[in-house]
Amino acid sequence: MSKKLIALLMAAMMLLSVAAACGKTETPGTEATQPGENTPANDSTADAGKVYKTYLTSEVASLNFLDNVDGNSSTPSSYAMSQMWKMYPNEDGTNYIWIDDLAVGDPIQVDDYNWQIKLREGATWQNGDPINADTWMFTFQQQLNPKLQMRMATFLYDNSVTIVNAENYLMQGSEGYPATVAWEEVGLKKVDEYTIQITTEDVHTDPVTIKKHFDNRNNVPVHQGMWEQCMSADGLTTSYGSDLDHFVGCGPYVFSTWEYDSIQIYTKNEEHWNADKYNFDTVEVRIVPEMNARVELFEKGDIFSLSPDANTIESYIDDPRMTSYGSTSVTHIDINCKNPNNPISGSVNYRKAIYHAIDRELAAASIFGHMEPTGVYVNTQAGMLSESALTYRDSEYGNAVEAMVESWGPYGYNPEMALDYLNKALAECNVSDSQLPITVKYCIDEGDTEWKALGEYLMEQWPTIFEGKMNLEIVPYAGMSATDFKLTGDDKWDLSPNDWARSMSRTYPHTCFYYYLESYSGRPNNYIVAEFDAQFQVCEDAKLGDYDNLLKETQKLEELYLEYVIHVPMCQSVNYELFADQIVLPVKTYIPGFGWGGIYGDLAE
């Protein structure tokens, strides 16, 4: 989701894998204890053992991992929850391996389309309740519940594999889907108490593909008893995870204290089957929206890592503790095509005007600080984990799209073209002079200093570029994600900075566009193009065949992305991170797809 540009790192490394009434929108409470535990509120004290101190830039909205779309939810998910399998640093710290978590052993291939997963016998929730095949079947059915429409359901039915009839079950009764689908028709079955079976639409032969499918912050179980208590009478909403009284964990740490918008505290679960792989006794996660406050905490030793922003990076760029590495994130700006108060919001010419009216080169250098400007969207890591290791951007097909963009101007910036497209949009939509200037609402989290600076720059530039016919107004918000702000009304926004990233694009480059399809229910944009969606499906059909052909089809997809301006690309993210001297990382360098493995780190003696 759109967070601080550089702070995306925290969702990609150390913390990735790492409400009494029922209702989706309740605000979490404070200092509640885990059901079945008696853990008091805990600040850093001498008896806390090894205390790891880190931060998030915004609070986690919910612990309902089946529904929470925000990347920061990976923090409580990685600490307080277990998955089927998890990535773990190898012995010499040069790569990662897979370790068993709630599953044991590799997935077992039954035939071309069926895989069985053996579950860990004796695994329990932190309140002592068993976790077995029934737990997972209940979780799957709730994640695909047609009434609830959990926003992370797509990660179950279509991630690295596609589960037979799962999407049809979720969307039954909707346009283009079967009227009814029985649960028994879905490719998720209980074989026995500790075995489940999945049925995929396509042929897969590598068990790692199945492991990757379940390697996500949302593919974790839910506690059936608690879920049922939290379900509303009409079955349309649930307050599961709204606070610690409505949540049960099963991870290597107990989520013991939640002081909302202040601090999260996790204490080691010594009863966890993988407890010996975790070295921290206590983890403190402070909620620190402001960069200046984070710098102060880092300098005082109250947090052990820091991702500097554009305003602070120069102070640290030569620090020997500084690390940098690439990313699957290309920051961009979503464009609202449904604002009833904007007479040209539905025009593609309007979208093209915005695309050509942003000087990305200047913004990357002067505003975002050591980022890379880009007029395209497929990220620089896309394809790096393919069999050939050829990235899309380094291929002839990716180069062709970049050449097209450069023919318009540096990274697509061309004020003359921007004005021309605006005039076409005004004429197309029959906008009269009395309706001018059009004011575009640029909504941002009030703590996003870089995006605010970009907005202020555009406020100065656009009246000149557009000859006074269109200007920009900054609309700040706080206490919610960009996705949630947009849900307050189409009339509230026109432009919204964002930075969604898809790790699977490292294997299949086209999947970076996954979140912007009509089929993705939690999509951050409201601009839908049937031709774009159809070409994405062409790429999907090609991904298990010849890789060169997949790259060729991805070029067509990216060209459609630019033709319709699905959204406006801004910068290829480069991650920068400093680590305090007392942190002992378990890997020697950043590992794409795994990060630093910080959850398995240690503290120097």
Image (cartoon, rainbow, N blue to C red):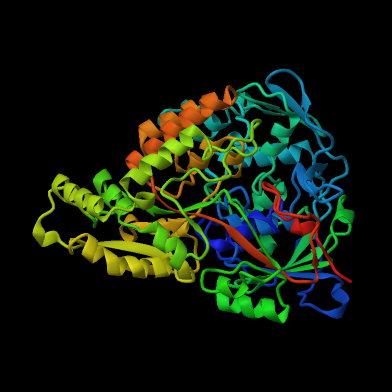
Residue placed at 62% from the left, 75% from the top? 294
**Image height check: is 338 above or below 76?**
above
The reply to whether residue 99 is in sight is: yes
Residue at x 67% of width, y 46% of height: 593
Is 65 placed above or below 292 here?
Answer: above
Above or below for 574 versus 427: below
The tally of labels here is 0
Q: Residue 543: where, in percent of width, then height?
A: 56, 27
The x and y percentages for residue 88 are 79, 48
Q: Give the camera-side residue of 12 and 318.
A: 318
User: Is residue 258 something one can see in this rendering?
Assistant: no
Q: Position of residue 513 (x, y in %)?
A: 48, 41
- Which residue reaches farthest top? 111
Query: Residue lying farthest left?
Result: 433
Q: Nearer the viewer, residue 294 or 588?
A: 588
Q: Is residue 507 left or right of residue 365?
A: right
144 over 476 or under it: above or below: above
Using the rendered view, name the quadrant where residue 42 is placed: bottom right
374 or 283, which is in the foreground?
374
Which quarter of the rendering shows the C terminus? bottom right
The reply, left or right, for residue 39 in relation to residue 198 is: right
In x, y percent, where is residue 245?
69, 63
For image coordinates 85% across by 40% down, the residue present is: 120
Q: Quadrant of residue 22?
A: bottom right
